[in-house]
Image (cartoon, coloured by chain):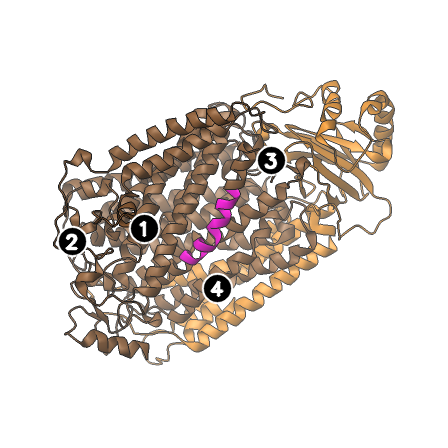
Amino acid sequence: MAIEIRPESAQVPDGREPDTAPKARPWWLRPAVHTALLGAIIGYVLGHLLGNAISSGYQQIPLSDDNDVPIVLGYLFGILGWLIGLGVFNDPFRQMLGKPVTGREEDEPVGGVAKYFRYTLDHKVVGIQYLFGMIGYFLTGGLFAMAIRAELLSPTYHLITPSAYLEVVGEHGTMMMMMMTSVVMGPLGNYLVPLMIGSKRVAFPRVEALSFWLTPCAFVILLSSLLVGGFPTGWTGYAPLSIQAGEGMDGYAIAFGLMGISAILAAFNIVVTIICYRAPGMRWSRLPMFVWAMLTTGFLLVLAAPVLVGGMYMIITDRTAQTAFFVNQLGGSSYLYEDLFWFFGHPEVYILALPGFGIVSEIIPVFCRKPLFGYKIAAAGMLGVAILSFFVWQHHLFDSGIDPDMRPLFMLTTELISIPTGFIYLVAMGTFWKAKIRLTVPMLFALGMYFNFLIGGISGVVLSDVPADTTSHGSFFVMAHFHYTIMGGLIFAFFGGIYYWLPKMLGIRLNQRLGKLHFWTMFIFFNSTFLPLFAVGELGQPRRVFEYARNLETLNDWVSISAFLLGASFLIFVYNFVMSTLFWREREIGNPWRSRGLEWQVSSPPPLNNFQHVPVVLSGPYEYGDPKALPVADLNPPAGVISGALAGTEA
Amino acid sequence: MATEASAPSSQAPEPAAGPRHGLRILILWVVASVICCPLVYFVWGPHLPPGDMSSAAANQQFDLQVLGTIATPVFLGVVIYMGYALTFWRAKDGDETDGPPIHGNAKVQLTWIAATTVIVLALAAFGTVELVTVQGAGAGEGPQPIWKPTSSTVLQVQVIGQQWAWTYRYPQFGGFETAQLELPLNKPVQFDVTSLDVIHGFWAYQLGVKADANPGVNNVAYTTPKHAGSFVVRCSELCGLWHGAMYDYGKVVTASAFQTWAQQTETQLASLTKTLPPYAMTYDPTEIANLGKVLVQLGIGGAGGGYYPPNDPEQP
C-alpha cells in the first residue's frame, strides 16, 4: 500500500522545500476566473478565425447546410484558452523546464474566498467548488423543466414555438444528465473520500482540480448553443438527426464530451485515491459504504465515459470533416450511434444510482443507532450492479429492429440487475429492525429515496419486459421511470447528503425546521408530479412532444401545477442555504449527529491537511450499540505505531 | 415476496422481550396482499392500456396485468415494513442510547437472495414466452423477423416515415401509396417500417405496435386486429421540429370493407403510383423527391421530398 507516512511530505505533490516562499503578485495578475475568461474569449476568437480560414472552400456537410468548422474550432480553442488562463499548464511546464513550481495549496491564503475562484489543489476546496457548481447546474436545468411543463399545460402549442420547445427539452435533458454524473462524486466524493479513508490528500490533486474547471466550460458551451438555434435531438442526440441539425448541435456534442472527460478525470482520481491512500487499518471490510459507492461509480465512469466521448467525437467529425460514421446512405449506421450512446448510457444510469445508495447507507445507521445490516451484502450489491450494468444496454433498442433474437437475453440481464439492487433494500430493512430511529432531515431524505426508488425500480421491471415495453417504450412512462430513479433516488439522496455533511464541509448547520419543510414539499410534489406521468405514458403520450391527446389535458395540467410547486420547494432550500450560511450561521463544530464516521472525528471544517497525523483505523464505521467496539480510529498514534499497523494490515 | 416480512421474525431470538414484530408485519403484509392482488388483477387489469384491439395489444395488457399483480406484494412488503418500523421503532425523546448491534443474519440474507432470484428468473421466463408466442409482441423485429405469424395470408403494409408525416404503401394492391391506414379485421398484418430521412418511431397505440423507422432499414412488426374502430399513430422517436405533430389516425374495418377500399384506392391512385419508385423494402434518399410528390398530391404538407433547413418551416 502506497501510504505517505511522513506528514510533511504528504501534502507536497512536487517535492519543493516547504519553506521557500512564493513570489507575491497582486491578485489581478494571478491566474483565476477573470484571466481564464479572458483566455477563453481570445481562444474562441482565434479558433473561429482559424476555422474560417481553413474551411472557406468546404462544401456543405451532407444533410445540412451549415459549415460547422469555425464554431467547433472556436469552442475547442476557447476551452484551451480557459485552461491556459486558469494557469492549469503553468506548473507542468515549469517542471518540464526544471523551474520551481508555485501552484501548491499551502501557498493559498487560508480562509479567503479567492481560492474558490482559482485552480486550487486542495480536495476540500474542489469539493466546495463542485457543490456550488452542481447546484447551479441543477437549478438551471430545473428552470428548463418549468418551461417544458408550462408548454404542456395545453394540448397544442401555445407558449413557445415548437423549435424553442425542442431546444428547451434538449437543454433540460443534457444539462441534468451532465450534472448528475458529477453531482455526488464532485462535491461529496472529492470532499469526503480522503477524510473517510484517513488520507491527507487525494492521489492526483491537479487532475481533480482540472475535472472541476472543465464543468463551467461545459455549462457555458451547452447554454451557448441556444444562441445559434439549440439542438433538436434531446439529450440522446440520435444520428442522423444530429448530423442534420444546425450549429447548436456542436455545442451539445462538445459540452457533453467535455463533461465526459471531466467525469473520467474525477473518477480516475477517486479510484486511485481509494485504492492507494487508505490509512493503516482501513481494510476493505471497514470501508464506509459511501466509499464503496464512489469506488464502483468511479470504475463505471472510467470504463463507460470514454465511449461517450468517442461518440461525441464522431458526431463532430461527421459534422465538420465530412466523415459518415452515422450516415446510412454513405456507409455509416445510425445503429452505431445508438449502440455507442447506450453502451455509455446504461452504465451511466447506474452511475446515477450507486452514489445515492452510498449516501443513504451512510445515513441510516447513524439515525437508526444500529450497525449497517449485512455490510458485505451491501458492498456485493454495489459491485453486482456495477458489473451487470455493462450487459443491459440493448434494452434501449428493443423496438429499433436490431437483432431480435438477443431480446430474451437482454431482458434476462436487465431483470437480473434487480437482484443486487434488492440487496440495498434488504440492508435498509435489516438496519431498521428494532432500531432507535431518529427522524432528522437527512433521515427523511434517505427514507424518501427508498420510497421513490422502489417505484422507480418496479416500473423498471415493467420496462425490461419486452411485451410490456412495446407500449411503454419512448413514452412518458419511461420518462416517469427515470425521473423516479434519478431525481427520486439520486437527488433525494444528494439533498440528504447536503443536510448531513454540510456541518462538516462548512462548519454550519442548515436550519432543520426549514429542512423538514423542504423535504415534505419536495417529497409530496415530486410524487404528485411524476406518479401521474406513468399513466400519461401508458395512455399514449410519447416523450418530447408539444402536442398530445385532448383527453390527457387534465392529467397534464395536474402534473404541470405539481411541477411548479416542486420547483418552488427548491426555493425553500435556496433560502435556507443562503440564510443559514450567510446570516444565521448556526455554528456546528464537531460531530452533531454523533456519527462514528472517520470524517466526523476531525474538526468541522477539517484543517488544511485533514489529519494532523495519519490516523490508525481501529474498527468499522458502523459499530453502534456494541459496547465492546473500539473507537473508530486513533488520531494521534504514538511514533512507530503506523509502521507496526502497516505490517499488521499487509500480513 | 415472503422474505420481506418473514425474514426479520427469524432473526431476533428474544422470546420474552416485547411483541412479536415479525409475526405482526407478516400478518399485515399477507392481509394487504390478499386484498390488493385480486383487485389489481381482476378490477384494474382489464382496464389497463393499451386495451385489446389487436393480438399484440391484448398480450401487452395481459403482461401489464401480471407484472402489476406481482409488483403489488413487493411494493406492499417494503412500504408496510418501513411504515411499521417508523411507527414502532422510533427513539423516544431524550433517548440517547443505541439499538441492538445486529450485523447481519445469514439465514435472512440467503432467503432473500433465493427468493429474489426465483422471482427474477420466473419473470424473465414469462417475458420470453410472451415475446415468442405472440409474434414478437408487436415490437419491431428488424429485416429478418424470427417470430412470425403461422397464417399464410398476411397483409403487408409498408410504413414510410419522413419529416413529419406517415405514408403507407400496400404492395399486394399494386403498391399504391396513401396517407390513410386501413386494416382488415382478424387478418395478420405485417408492417414493414422504414424511413426516408432520420429515425422515426411508428407507434400504433391501440394496436400495441411499436417499431422504429430507420433510414435504409426495413423493420418488421406483426399484429392481428381483433376489434373494429380507429386507432392513433404517433411518432415515438424524436425526429426534429414537428415531432409532436407527427400523428395520424388509422382504421380497422371488416374484411370486405377493406377489400373495397383497397381496390378503389388502387384504381383511383393508379396514375400516381406509376410515378413512384417501384415498391422496395427501403428507399434511397435520391428517390425521396419522387415519393414526395405523393405527399403534395395527397395534400399533406411536410418535407415534400426535400430536407428542411434547420430554422422553422411551416407546420405540415
Mark nearer the viewer, 1 or 4: 1
In this image, A515 relative to B103: left or right? left
Q: Report helix, strand or loop for mark 4.
A: helix
Mark sitting earlier along the chain (2/1): 1
Where residue A411 sits, quadrant-wise, is: bottom right
Q: Residues in magenta?
A: A297-312
One can see residue A483 in this view: yes
Q: Which residue is mark 2?
A: A588
Mark sitting earlier along the chain (4/3): 3
- Our reading of the magenta stretch's main secondary structure is helix
Residue at left 14%, top 36%? A26
Label ID, residue A240? 3
Which chain is painted in orange?
B
Is A309 a magenta residue? yes
Quick check: A77 above or below A122?
Answer: above
Tell me the distance, in whole angstroms, between the alpha carbons under discs 3 and 2: 55 Å
For label 4, count other residues whose C-alpha is less than 10 Å away and answer few (under 14), some (14-19) or many (20+): many
Tell me the distance, in whole angstroms, between the alpha carbons under discs 1 and 4: 27 Å
Q: Amino acid at mark 1?
A: Glu
Q: Report helix, strand or loop for mark 1.
A: helix
Q: Which residue is mark 1?
A: A208
Mark sitting earlier along the chain (3/2): 3
Q: Which residue is mark 4?
A: A384
